[in-house]
Image (cartoon, grey):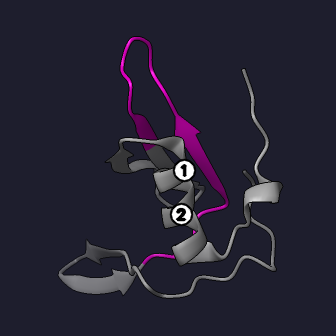
Amino acid sequence: MFLSSQHTSTRVVRRYRYVNGEKIELSPPQEIRIVQYTPDSGFYLFQISQEWGASEEGYFETEELAMEQVYKEFQVTWDEWEAIA
């Protein structure tokens, strides 16, 4: 899922990085992926940014729970997701 300008952060979750001892809020990611690895039954949520690369944001028992988390953070609706095999 590539985030567009309509997917602004709800600021429910804020991410920070420390640079030279200074706390800096990270910009929102450009892309979000929900991935399931074989034979694992759960789903991993990754956020990808040019600024800070890829980061794992959580492990979820179901794909729906991961999608709900993304909705809470960026208002991405269910019909916006695309399945890639």
Q: Work out whether 79 lies above or below 45.
A: below
Residue at the extreme left:
21
Task: Find residue 23 and report its image quarter.
Answer: bottom left
- Would you say 53 lies left or right of 20 here? right
Amino acid type, mark 2: Glu
Residue at the extreme top:
39
Task: Find residue 49 and report its image quarter.
Answer: bottom right
Q: Work out whether 25 lies above or below 38.
A: below
Q: Are marks 1 and 2 in contact (CB under 8 Å)?
A: yes
Q: Position of residue 2 (x, y in %)?
A: 75, 55
Indicate the secondary structure of the residue bearing disc 2.
helix
Mark 2 sits on what residue? 68
| Location of the C terminus (image quadrant) | top right
Q: Nearer the viewer, residue 34 or 25?
A: 34
Q: Position of residue 56 (x, y in %)?
A: 38, 47
Mark 1 sits on what residue? 64
